[in-house]
Image: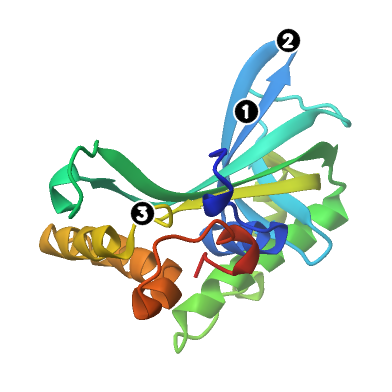
Amino acid sequence: MHPDPAFAMSADEARAFAADVAFAHIFLAVAERPMVIHAPVTVDAASTLSFHIARRNRAMPIAAGTRAIASFGGPGAYVSPDWYEGADQVPTWNYVVAEAEGVIEPFDDERLIAHLDAASHAQESRLAPKPEWTRGKMDPRRFDAMRPAIEGFALHVEQWRGTAKLSQNKPAADVRGVIAGLRGAGKDHPADLVERANRARLQDGSTFRSDVGENGGFP
């Protein structure tokens, strides 16, 4: 995570961001070898992150108690120094990321099924008004035949961390230049994030805020 407190996300912001992204790069060590798992995830209110992977994944088997970090990547964009009003600037990159650190616990079959139902519901609900797909639409025998090919896990999160680096450390005039530059480059989503993260001081003309992370700078 970026060390500047101007970019820090609160634990609640990081958790909400992870739940929205819903796909993680999970870093761990198996038999003293570094591994990365790429998996869809769900995040519950108790800060438990659930995921499943193929039993043939090279990271398998994963022992109970294995420590891991789940990383969530969000929108990002290059920022040209030409967009700033001030002189003698350097190129940079605006981005939003979060990570969760904790201990892994394997699921039993009942918890795996509950996770699969929760994961599909979380994504299907975003597709409304399309009628939601559920495993009730499957032949139960087909579902039971496919399930042994995967294994489910919980990551019991001990710490959430997040960075929303969105030009909060720049003067308002430079922020306006970044927003205009991003929009001119067709990067409307990153531009929207910069605008929302800096809305208060763009309105009052202040220079920068050092408390953005703790006071809701991440939209």
Whole-Å distance between the Cαs marked 1 and 2? 19 Å
User: Type of residue at label 1?
Assistant: Arg
Which residue is drawn at the image coordinates 39% and 62% (left, top)? 207
The answer to whether residue 114 is left or right of residue 163 is right
Where residue 109 sits in the image (x, y, percent)? 84, 50
The numbered mark, 2 or 3, whose residue comes first in the sequence reads 2
The answer to whether residue 97 is left or right of residue 153 is left
Give yes or no for contact between labels 2 and 3 (Cβ–Cβ under 8 Å).
no
Give yes or no for contact between labels 3 and 1 (Cβ–Cβ under 8 Å).
no
Q: What's the colour scheme?
A: rainbow
* Residue that numbered label 3 is attached to: 170
The numbered mark, 3 or 1, whose residue comes first in the sequence reads 1
Q: Which mark is residue 56?
A: 1
Which residue is drawn at the image coordinates 84% and 56% (left, top)? 111
Judge depth for marks 1 and 2 and give the one in front: 2
Judge depth for marks 2 and 3 and give the one in front: 3
Which residue is drawn at the image coordinates 79% and 47% (left, top)? 157
Residue situated in front as seen by the camera: 3 or 106 = 3
Where residue 130 sits in the image (x, y, percent)? 45, 85
* Count of numbered marks: 3
Secondary structure of the residue carrying numbered label 2: loop
* Residue that numbered label 2 is attached to: 32
Whole-Å distance between the Cαs marked 2 and 3? 43 Å
Judge depth for marks 3 and 1 and give the one in front: 3
Whole-Å distance between the Cαs marked 3 and 1? 48 Å
Where residue 123 sits in the image (x, y, percent)? 54, 69
